[in-house]
Image (cartoon, coloured by chain):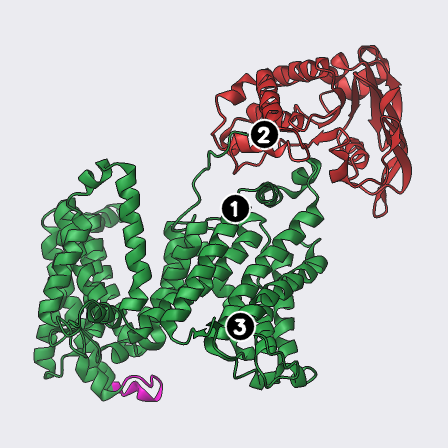
Chain colours: A red, B green
Amino acid sequence: MSALAADDLHVAYGNIRALRGVSLSVAEGTICAVVGANGAGKTTTLNAICGLRTLTQGRITLDGRDVTTIPPHDLVPLGLVQVPEGRRVFSRLTVRENLSMGAFRRRSPRGELAEDLDRVLGLFPRLRERMTQLAGTLSGGEQQMLAMGRALMSKPRTLLMDEPSMGLAPRFVDQVFETIVAINKLGVTILLVEQNAYMALEIAQMAYVLQSGEIVLAGPGPELIDSEAVRTAYLG
Amino acid sequence: MASDLAQGVARRPIALPGGLRPAVNVTISVAVVCAFTVLVGLFGQFSDRAMVVGVLDIGHSLMLAAALAGGAVLARRQRMASVLIVALISGAVAGGLVQALVVVARWANLRWMLVSLTPVTLNRVGFLLPDDQAALVLAASGACAALVGAGLVLCGPIPRRIVLGALGGVVCAGLLRELIRGILGGLGGVDDWGFTYDGLLPAGAAVSAAIGALVTIRPGAARYAQLPPRVKLGARLLCLLVLLALPALTNDFVAQVMMLVCLYTLMGLGLNIELGLAGLVDLGFVAFFAVGAYTVGLLTADATGAGGHLTFFAALPFSIAFAALAGFLFGLPVLKVRGDYLAIATLGLGEIIRVLVLSDMLKPELGGAQGIVNIPKPALFGFVLSSPTRLFYMTAIMAAAAGYIAWRLQHSGLGRRWLAVREDEDVAQALGINLVGVKLSAYTMGAGFAGLAGGIFAGMVGSVFPQSFQLLVSVNVLAILVVGGIGSLPGVIIGAAALIGAPEVLRDLGEYRYLIYGIVVIAVVRLKPDGLSPKAIRQREAL
């Protein structure tokens, strides 16, 4: 069964039709990538899925349940969490506070939360050293780690990631993708939107190529890397 | 050829350290500042108030301060002993210039344009002496002040602090005459010591200078720092107790001022929830204050249409509730508006309330411009809180309770939701925070605090008029937060004391006391942009 499915999504900004019937499906426990050029509608797709954009048409199902009309904040308790684009951490709060912000919608005993914090910090050892530092003083790579860690604190079953490698040094890009694989290994389904097509396709079991608001190609990630269309369009 | 000539000009030896130009600039600046105080009437108003009786008036103190600052500026440019001579000359010339300008002004007769430029004021600049003697005296005092200013920069930090502390002590004692006399009087009928009705006596000035110097060098500060925390806490509590006891020990004026500070602290706590925690700018905050005040007015005063006969304390919860309801309704339309637009939208909503209470439509109920009068004084079990002192204690207790609630809220889950919304609305929503609910709760609770303040205000004054609910109140509360440090609870109290307390205490300065207000705001924004008591980076709860 697919953990997350989008069926015929249409989104318009005024007269501009940003999405024209995007359909995709993410199998449980896999990494799915949506690649495409700037302005292809990648971020809009993610925002539409988590309810931040109004659909003119379409249907979204999470674990078989129709969530099309559920407001974004109520999707978090259902296990769908987004890591927003551009390392949006709360820069004037400490790392610890940022992480605790991720656990808002949970009613778990304190001990369990501490355990989760420990597990998240296990994935991001660098954050452990910087718990009391202001998030705004972290490096770009660390901020991306923090944004991912914050999302993990809400115990998502499906994680939406918007351009996690954007603006990062190559060294950190590798690290971010390694971390994404590690998170996936913990059993979290991942829908990844990336401009860095090569890296994203490499780790994705399933991938979609988006062009002008439409899916033009779909298939297992590594296969798409070799496809001529992707090569000429996005990899050069 | 030409360039040689230019170089020759540039190289012309100048005997003054640092060059002639800075000295000339400073001299002219000092003279212009002094002349300005005379022209706008600042001097005229202050020159009949004594800083130290028989020695110096406040007007001339301003001029001396300008010369002192001029000397310091010169010395900071050129840190060498010879700059002292430059400062001396500069101060003297500036003093002479001032008197020269007086002569010119008298001759030109500018009174048709500058009303405050009376002959008496002009004569006062020169201490009512003939022009030539006046010029000498002004030049001499300017020279001394500039010399001291330059010397303060050149000397070591300890003498500098002692002198500045002493000067500060005299200025404080001189300006806070009424307050200090009240305290001295309260502490055992010694209110005539060191002061007369006109101001500080030379003996009192000497004592103030000594106290000021002692405070700045703080002998024993190192030893105090080593005391165990429990003793330090005790010392702080003792200070707090003394502060709280002040209104009871002194006069009604002190109580009145402290009550106002408490009232604005209450409002500041409310706005702090909206702006400091949830990041929602609100320029219409006075509306909630008005709702609270009118609620108490309507429910307690006999004369009104509503004709409630509740007691003050029975009406107060309604104040909070109605204001909170107003906050909720107020929040609804502006929920989707952000940033600058939010500021303007709230500004409009704030004005709506004021216009409503002024309107003829609601006149039968709310009294229109005549307002509601005859609101009974608060009474608790037959004990009427009539004097400012009693009202102060009531306000202080309420403010303390509100402060505790605000503190608990700030550290609650809701408080952290507010923080998340303030920092980044989109991310907050992505983390599962309901923006609508969180913003509405901030408006509702913030308004509740203002409603409480408004209710107290109505009981305290005994009447409510639409004029009391100007935009200025909202701006005041906003300025309190900015000065104290946005999002900081101690900052609210400090901001209220600095912006509400200080101008009240400095009544002597007349209409110019709001200059102090302006100077405080600008100085804080410029020098301490995070406020006087910025919120420390919290390293709070381990999840």
> Which chain does tag 2 point to?
A
Q: Is residue B112 magenta?
A: yes
Dominant SS of magenta comes to loop
Classed neighbour count for the residue bearing mark 2: other residues with Cα under 10 Å, few (<14), some (14–19), many (≥20): many
* Image quadrant where one finds the N terminus of chain A: top right
- Check whether the beta carbons of the residues at disc 3 and disc 1 lie within 8 A of each other: no
Pinpoint residue B171: horizontal percent, then vertical percent.
21, 65
Amino acid residing under circle 2: Leu
In the rendered structure, which disc, 3 or 1, sits on the residue that comes first in sequence? 3
Amino acid residing under circle 1: Arg
Residue at 53% x, 22% y: name it. Answer: A127
Give the numbered dot on residue B408: 1
Above or below, comparing residue B296 to residue A26 in the picture:
below
Residue B173, by quadrant, is bottom left
Give the numbered dot on residue B287: none
Q: CA distance from mark 3 to mark 2?
A: 46 Å
**Foreground tag (3 vs 1):** 3
Question: Considering depth in this image, is B207 or B313 the residue closer to the camera?
Answer: B313
What range of the chain is rendered magenta? B108-117
Q: Do callouts 1 and 2 point to residues on the same chain? A: no
Q: CA distance from mark 1 to mark 2?
A: 21 Å
The reply to whether residue A185 is in sight is: yes
Amino acid residing under circle 3: Phe
Give the numbered dot on residue A99: 2
Residue lying farthest to the front in this orientation: B381
Give the numbered dot on residue B312: 3
Classed neighbour count for the residue bearing mark 3: other residues with Cα under 10 Å, few (<14), some (14–19), many (≥20): many
